[in-house]
Image: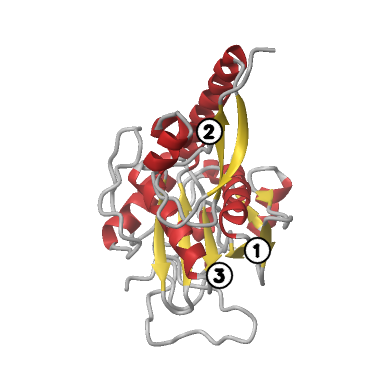
Amino acid sequence: MFTHGGFAPEEGERPDRSMHFPRMARMTRSPSTFGRFGTGVASLATAGALTFAWAAIPAQAQSLRGSDRSLDRQNRAAIQHDFSFLETGAQVRKFADNGWLVRIRPNEDVELHAVSFPYARPEVELFIRRLGSQYRAACGERLVVTSLTRPATRQPRNASGRSVHPTGMAVDLRYSRDRRCRRWLEGVLVDLEKAGILEATRELRPAHYHVAVFPRQYAAYVRRMETRAVARMTVAQARGRVEAPYTVRPGDSLWTIARRHDTTVDELKAINQLPGSRIYAGQVLTVPLAGQEP
């Protein structure tokens, strides 16, 4: 297992020293590194010369196993976004004070556990908020965040020198004890990775998910989903159609549910903002019902 971001041990845990990677190389900065938008690039000695054209980050093998190529895609995204690799806690706080990082706050859907620096890029906050709501609706427990922005000087010993945690674009999520919740979350992460929106890795020691969110790609994805939702509601109102909750039963698929409610798989995915076709028993979906004209 190639460790992408290393891990911040939870309370009572000790770091695993058997998987040691070099610490973050010292970074060089240009005067623009801490410019107005706080998105300058700090060059990494280990990163090499990366050339690219602005486009969606290409997704390849989606297995959550992690790889050198996955690290390449994460670093390419950081460079495309012109993100700084922060070295100290003081720099993290400076970025937060200027609004370049936003505070992640717990709510009824999201829990923060032993997070030293509860800040992230605004799009990562949006990702956590949306995912937390969907995760709790799907499996009935809160999404637990165990790490967010980590400056280079606070990286664990087993962290890769190319970790993007110092940029604020990564989040670590706890590995649930509920197999149903793990299946749902892994399915969503794989689907979003296929769409080139993020890179996700299932780490082993301790068990957790490392997720690097590609901010511009994710923001564009959310805009598309919201536009479709508005269009769907407009059509539904014009047709006098109403919607109702539906709890997925064992053996259900989107196809069988769509047939049962006289709709299509694509419409169900749009209504429920599903990135793929995976659903699980106990998950609550919204389904269209035939209504009467007012």
Identify which residue is drawn at 38% across, 70% down.
3
Can see residue 154? Answer: yes
Dot 2 surroundings within 10 Å: few (below 14), some, or many (20 or more)?
many
1 and 3 marks in contact (CB < 8 Å): yes
The numbered dot on residue 89 is: 1
- Residue 168 percent coordinates (x, y): 55, 53
Above or below residue 256? Residue 135 is: below
Identify which residue is drawn at 43% across, 47% down.
78
Task: Identify the secondary structure beneath mark 2.
Answer: helix
- Residue 57 percent coordinates (x, y): 34, 41
Identify which residue is drawn at 30% across, 54% down.
62
Can see residue 42? Answer: no
Closer-to-camera residue (165/61): 61
1 and 2 marks in contact (CB < 8 Å): no
Instruction: Name the amino acid type tagged 3.
Output: Thr
The numbered dot on residue 141 is: none
The numbered dot on residue 271 is: 2
Task: Identify the secondary structure beneath mark 3.
Answer: helix
Q: CA distance from mark 1 to mark 2?
A: 41 Å
Task: State which quadrant residue 266 falls in.
Answer: top left
- Residue 259 percent coordinates (x, y): 41, 34
**Going from the N terminus, do you reach mark 1 or mark 3 first?**
1
- Residue 64 percent coordinates (x, y): 35, 61
Dot 1 surroundings within 10 Å: few (below 14), some, or many (20 or more)?
some
Above or below residue 161? Residue 279 is: above
Would you name the residue on which mark 3 appears?
A: 153
Instruction: Name the amino acid type tagged 1.
Output: Gly
